[in-house]
């Protein structure tokens, strides 16, 4: 029987967040549906536990840093682990981010413990410090062994010793779904007094099937140490990186671009054969046998062969006339590395055409290559109460990812139409009543008087109020004394027809935007 090795990285959502945001060693927790899904060791030392509600976790650890769960980011981060494992042995089976299985390559490395040591060493070199390995006859037993292994070490269950290893484990380990919820079958077994796997395995298999059905029979076989389901290997992702080498090295941009064209066409064709397109590519340029220039390029639609050649040409373009090129030496090789590959159907033209004009795409991309990726942006809309909070600037070519959902309810949001001009900083303004008295808003959102005259900005004239609407009160971040704000917005129209969006905070008025 082939042996199974399970690799477990505890608290993987926290590891993924730390790798993505560069978080330090402070207490961190990842939330899913308002409850703690995973937490760091420092948070666990303060009393934070999986399944706690947000408020309970913060009461245990006031310094706790919270992050929302991002399953896609977890999977992308774990992909690096899978690729590294596939360099050691083929046929890795990902179970979920942070947990995978493979057949033990013991014969090559000299033993099962030795194979686990080699794997742990490679993953520690990637920056994954807490990695635990279990080896056993079956997948379930190997996972339980990994969960009881020390960090950067392995627990090897001898062949035929699964039942003895499982005998004293608590019955709760049968809940292997990873969501922290206890199944009804396991809960019933606990109420019946079957607190360990050995107690459950001692029951006759036929009686278990009669009482608990097929699911109970499966749990009984696992408790008895039977192999259960095997490892389902994943298909190794195809190698899509395209490389062209120059011998002898080339020092003219037009020669490099001409020689690259066939490779670029093969790169696009290989993706098209898989019904995919590349929307982000990393171009690496080698000189003297090492990478001298690397840059990530994005495309608002997808890269064609001409687009790829243009990006290489722009990346090599001299910054000052008379220079040989941006790399400063003859070029040995150029690599096209796809970073984002998406299905072709997501980018196909509609029945009536559509999308950006190719000349516009190439022109904007050229400017972006000259002034920097972050310097050319497009505008999108996200959620928020004020107009300044709702605009979102996205680097050209990237998909807009809103920090706040636009469809969510936003109490205190001013109804449409939206103002045409939003000031970068609210301008100081003045609003008075009929007798020149100041006008404000009480804590209950009641206006202290009618708006009679206003001055929208410093240096402007006082205008009589033709009409006004409001207030729309906003009690923002009331739980944080330092960041809390209580404001109210008004729409004010002057007798000259000008319309303004104004806010009042602590009795002081400001003009936030102007309507056309």
Image (cartoon, helix red, strand yellow):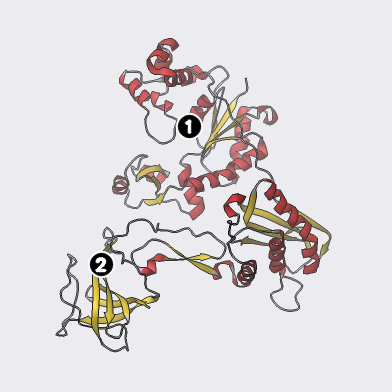
Q: Residue furthest right?
A: 248
Label disc, if present, on residue 147 of the rendered structure: 1
Spot occupied by residue 211 in the image (x, y as percentages of width and height) = 37, 15
Residue depicted at 62% across the width and 42% down the height: 83
Q: Is residue 503 left or right of residue 164?
A: left
Task: Estimate how packed mark 2 is, as few (under 14), some (14 to 19) or many (20 or more) residues with alpha carbons within 10 Å.
Answer: some
Instruction: Decide which of 475, 88 is in the foreground and name it.
Output: 475
Instruction: Decide which of 366, 79 is in the foreground and name it.
Output: 366
Residue 485: image quadrant is: bottom left
* Residue 343 visible in image: no
Spot occupied by residue 469 in the image (x, y as percentages of width and height) = 24, 72
Q: Nearer the viewer, mark 2 or mark 1?
A: 2
Spot occupied by residue 467 in the image (x, y as percentages of width and height) = 24, 78
Q: Is residue 209 left or right of residue 293?
A: left
Query: Cβ–Cβ below 8 Å for labels 2 and 1?
Result: no
- In what element is the residue under mark 1? helix
Label disc, if present, on residue 472 of the rendered structure: 2
Q: Is residue 99 left or right of residue 442?
A: right
Task: Estimate how packed mark 1 is, as few (under 14), some (14 to 19) or many (20 or more) residues with alpha carbons within 10 Å.
Answer: many
Q: Quadrant of the N terminus?
A: top right
* Residue 182 visible in image: yes
Q: Earlier in the sequence, mark 2 or mark 1?
A: 1
Residue depicted at 60% across the width and 29% down the height: 113
Query: Is 173 located above or below residue 460 in the figure?
Result: above
Residue depicted at 67% across the width and 54% down the height: 337
Residue depicted at 48% across the width and 42% down the height: 12
Residue 262: image quadrant is: bottom right
Query: Is 488 located above or below residue 516 in the figure?
Result: above
């Amino acid at each position: 029987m082939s042996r199974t090795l399970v690799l477990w990285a505890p608290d993987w959502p926290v590891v993924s967040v730390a790798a993505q945001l560069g978080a330090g060693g402070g207490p961190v927790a990842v939330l899913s549906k308002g409850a703690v899904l995973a937490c760091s060791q420092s948070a666990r030392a303060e009393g934070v536990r999986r399944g706690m509600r947000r408020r309970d976790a913060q009461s245990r650890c006031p310094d706790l840093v919270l992050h929302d769960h991002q399953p896609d980011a977890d999977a992308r981060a774990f992909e690096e682990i899978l690729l590294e494992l596939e360099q050691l042995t083929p046929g890795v089976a990902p179970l979920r981010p942070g947990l995978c299985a493979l057949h033990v390559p013991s014969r090559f490395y000299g033993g099962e413990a030795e194979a686990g040591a080699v794997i742990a060493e490679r993953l520690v070199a990637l920056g994954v410090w807490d990695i635990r390995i279990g080896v056993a006859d079956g997948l379930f037993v190997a996972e339980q062994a990994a969960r009881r292994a020390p960090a950067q070490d392995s627990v090897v269950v001898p062949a035929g010793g699964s039942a003895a290893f499982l005998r004293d484990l608590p019955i709760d380990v049968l809940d292997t779904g990873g969501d922290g919820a206890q199944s009804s079958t396991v809960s019933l077994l606990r109420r019946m007094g079957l607190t360990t796997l050995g107690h459950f395995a001692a029951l006759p298999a036929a009686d278990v099937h009669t009482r608990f059905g097929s699911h109970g029979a499966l749990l009984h076989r696992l408790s008895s140490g039977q192999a259960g389901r095997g490892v389902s290997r994943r298909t190794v992702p195809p190698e899509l990186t395209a490389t062209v080498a120059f011998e002898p090295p080339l020092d003219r941009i037009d020669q490099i671009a001409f020689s690259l064209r066939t490779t670029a066409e093969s790169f696009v064709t290989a993706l098209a054969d898989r019904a995919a397109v590349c929307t982000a590519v990393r171009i690496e340029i080698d000189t003297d046998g090492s990478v001298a220039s690397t840059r990530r390029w994005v495309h608002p639609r997808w890269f064609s062969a001409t687009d790829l050649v243009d990006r290489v040409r722009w990346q090599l373009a001299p910054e000052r006339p008379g220079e040989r090129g941006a790399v400063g030496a003859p070029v040995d090789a150029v690599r096209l590395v796809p970073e984002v590959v998406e299905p072709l159907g997501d980018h196909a033209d509609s029945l009536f055409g559509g999308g950006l004009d190719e000349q516009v795409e190439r022109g904007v991309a050229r400017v972006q290559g000259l002034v920097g990726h972050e310097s050319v942006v497009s505008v999108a809309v996200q959620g928020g109460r004020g107009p300044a909070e709702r605009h979102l600037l996205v680097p050209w070519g990237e998909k807009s990812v809103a920090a706040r959902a636009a469809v969510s309810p936003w109490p205190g949001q001013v109804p449409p139409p939206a103002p045409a001009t939003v000031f970068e900083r609210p301008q100081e303004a003045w609003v008075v009543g009929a007798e020149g008295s100041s006008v404000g808003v009480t804590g209950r959102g009641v206006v202290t008087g009618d708006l009679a005259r206003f001055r929208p900005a410093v240096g402007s004239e006082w205008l009589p109020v033709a009409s006004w609407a409001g207030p729309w009160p906003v009690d923002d971040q009331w739980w944080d004394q330092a960041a809390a704000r209580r404001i109210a917005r008004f729409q004010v129209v002057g007798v000259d027809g000008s319309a303004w969006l104004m806010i009042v905070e602590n009795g002081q008025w400001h003009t936030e935007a102007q309507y056309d």
